[in-house]
Amino acid sequence: MSDIVALILPFFGLIFLGFAVARFARQPIEALGWMNVFVIYVALPALFFQLLSKTPIEQLTEWKFIFGSVFSTFLIFLTMFLLSLVFSRGQIAESTIRGLASAYGNIGYMGPGLALLALGEQAAVPVALIFCFENMMHFTVAPTLMALSGKDHEKPLQLAVKVVKEIALHPFIIATALGVLAAYFHFRSPLAIDRLLDSLAKAAAPCALFAMGVTLALRPLKRVPRELGGIALLKLAVHPALCYVMLSLVGHFSPVWVFSAVLLASLPTATNVFVIAQQYGVWVERASASILLTTVLSVVTVTATLYVIKSGMLPPDLFP
């Protein structure tokens, strides 16, 4: 258990430090802007490129793995979306944000660093694939449903162009595509560029987690609405369990790949859910609350997930 604590403490410790410093320094949330730009546009793309470019190309086309992990996420989203649609009497916009809060995990900020430290560099490929394809799904589902709800008044063609741009121009996805191309053509960066990318990649996780702590401090939880209990249950418990069962059903994969997917599925709600809620002016305060609540609870649930993985209690295949 001490190994698990040593593994998990640096990550939640960085979030806590960001939270504590934000409470002490009292800077406006706008001051976090350039940190987020560095993480999203520079550090994490460098990390994805470095890891993928050095991966054999045959490992980047595991379509059964991609389907199993992404479809499980979609089922979690669909479950909450439909339940919310029934109980809210057809509120599509609010139901969309609730669905995202239940399914959209913090796979960008927390995922890569935690998976690599816990499972080694072999986790890089499954993490990048999950990130790329899950974000494609989220970036497609959110604006489409918001358009159906009337919150986005763009014409169908304009909406389609917007969705394609959001997917194609996202820095993580561009970096992933470049990394795959580099792996295919066996391209290796010049030594000086390679060292620069390594330095940026090493800064990705610490900066992202610190920034996440600051964000949580500046958006305090005023109260816990009742529906957040269901969101937390789906996100932190049902999602990783469903992902594990789904991957066991669709194929036989490397233990590192399976455990990477389960670990990413167990992560708390992504801060992007708040960004989407704010963009459309829907369920904003509760979206922020869901991020804070699931992040606090994930200290226990992610630790438990790591424990069952590292202790050997979780077999890599439920149906060997």
Image (spheres, rainbow, N blue to C red):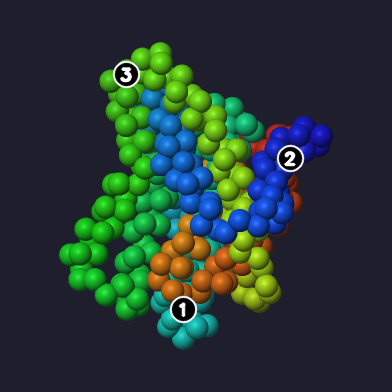
- The answer to whether residue 4 is above or below residue 283 is above
Q: Pointer 2: what residue?
A: 9
Q: In which quarter of the view is residue 181 placed?
A: top left
Q: Residue at x 76, y 34 (%)?
A: 6
Q: Is residue 86 visible?
A: yes
Element carrying mark 2: helix
Q: Residue at x 44, y 81 (%)?
A: 91
| Disc 3 from disc 2: Cα separation | 36 Å
* Crowd band around label 2 with a 10 angstrom C-alpha radius: few (<14), some (14–19), many (20+): some
Out of 187 and 87, give the one closest to the viewer: 187
Out of 240 and 296, give the one closest to the viewer: 296
| Mark sitting on residue 85 | 1
| Mark sitting on residue 187 | 3
| Disc 1 from disc 2: Cα separation | 39 Å
| Disc 3 from disc 1: Cα separation | 49 Å
Q: Horizontal placement of 162 versus 251: left or right?
A: left
> What's the residue type where badge 2 is placed?
Leu
- The answer to whether residue 107 is above or below residue 230 is above
